[in-house]
Amino acid sequence: MTKASLLDRLVAPAERLLAALSDPARRERTVVVALVAYVVVWTLYGVLAKAGQDLHVDMPEMLVWSRELALGYPKHPPLAAWLVAAWFAVFPVADWSFYLLAMTVAGVALWIVWRLAGDHLDGEKRALALVLMTFVPFFNFHALKFNANTILLPLWAATTLCFLRSYERRSVLWAALAGVFAAASMLGKYWSVFLLLGLGIAALLDSRRAAYFKSAAPWVTIVVGAVLIAPHLAWHANAEFSPLNYATIVRSGAGGHPLKGAGGYLAVGLAYAALAIALALTAIKPNRAVAADMLWPAAPERRFMTMAFWLPLLLPAVLAPIVGIEITSLWTMSAWALLPVVLLSSPLIALDRRPATAVLAAAVVFPVVMVAVAPFIAGAIHRGGGMPAAMHSRLLAQRVAHEWRRVTDKPLQMVAGESDLAYGVAAYLPGRPSAFPEFNRRLAPWADAARLKRDGVAIVCQATEPTCSMPAAALGLTGPRTEVEVTRTYFGTPGRTGRYTIIIVPPQP
């Protein structure tokens, strides 16, 4: 067998998949099957690559919040916690199911990208648009860390899809859906204000704006969105605007310079999308005319869509230095849904099938290769060590449960201490306990004095932080104290040993 014939045999499955994704009769069924496979394979990668550690600290925090359902939380709006609560009402609380949730969110986002692309692209262009997004690490590596950023992946895409359709069609239904997803985006993270601001400015700058604002569409969107977010705004007022205060304090005191941060936001954010952009340019080989039409299209529909892409992405970099807030490139995560449409929608582009097939083949092979090397990645992480909560939360939970049972037969319902440890240990304990991070009621309004006295609390600190237990003593939380050492092993190889202090405060009559 010649080298050329072997290569043809390897590429043949990709050619068949590209044909199925381009065929109107088969493409919808094919894309669902492909995305389900994508979710499963990347979930498997997450389980294997992270087997030497526990969940990232953002995930136990979200899990514990989901046990205290509310209209808002001290650091973020509530939608992510609500989703976690709904998910674990069906699935067991386990690392694999959390990674499955995270990748399902990414898979839904990719499906919405597919729908977005379908409004502007067809055939092989539409298939390539979806494939390109799988090379953006926000839809796989970063997606595995479920938090208030990753939940915006499908929400921003859905808001953009519905808004563009409501603008072009003046449809009340799509306008109402735009309001629903706009509110959902704000309930996911307040960063979404840049999406809404960007889409609004795009509408104001478009030459067809008069017809849009004379229709019912914009007002339906505004009213629906306002009604849905009103309960959270009422909660905000009662909570003294604590999430906004938290965000302002943390980001204005992030230790950098806002202007430098804005530059990094753009430069590193574009670097995340660089591979997808490079692959697209390889497939289309644009000349000067194509590049000009790509950056500023002649057709008003495409020009409006291009503004809807660029404005939410660029506005933070413009406004952050003005208000003195430092931003990070990870926050570009949710802004890329329209990228492949911007790259491929020019009618001047004649897609070269062979490079497109090669890109699709690479997209299929890449996650399979990552699954193969995942155990080695896990081993490297294990040997390198990590944050105490990421390495020892599960083991500490076992020791805390043991010490609790030695003191009382009542169920353990609260874990306090250093923030990451409190959330991490609570996440791995049976019985769905809550957390009291840093002994700070602003971070845990559910941990009032009466509840702490009635239910008791287990306190976990690093032994090297003797001051951790001082706030507990100030609150009258005292009890038997134990120092423990825990060491995680991975395939028989011990990792870094951690020393911790556990204080059991039993329930009081």
Image (cartoon, helix red, strand yellow):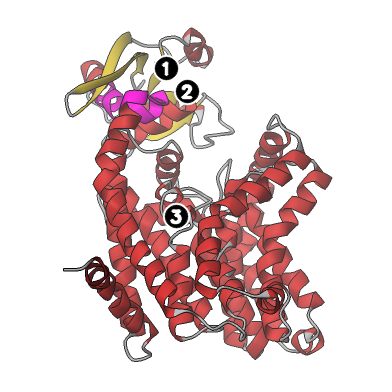
Q: Of 24 and 116, which appears nearest the observer? A: 24
Label placed on residue 145: none
Among numbered discs 1 and 3, the one appearing first in the sequence:
3
Disc 2 to disc 3, C-alpha distance: 24 Å
Estimate the x, y position of residue 407 in percent, counting from the top left. 25, 16
Mark nearest the camera among 1 and 3 is: 1
Residue 86 shows up from this direction: no
The residue to which callout 2 is attached is 418
* Magenta range: 383-401
Q: Does residue 338 lie above or below 465 as drawn?
A: below
- The crowd level at tag 3 (other Cα within 10 Å; few <14, some 14-19, many 20+) is many
Is 388 part of what is drawn in magenta? yes
Q: Secondary structure at mark 1?
A: strand
The residue to which callout 3 is attached is 82
The residue to which callout 1 is attached is 461
Residue at 49% x, 14% y is 468
Q: Of 232 and 116, which appears nearest the observer? A: 116
Residue at 80% x, 44% y is 321
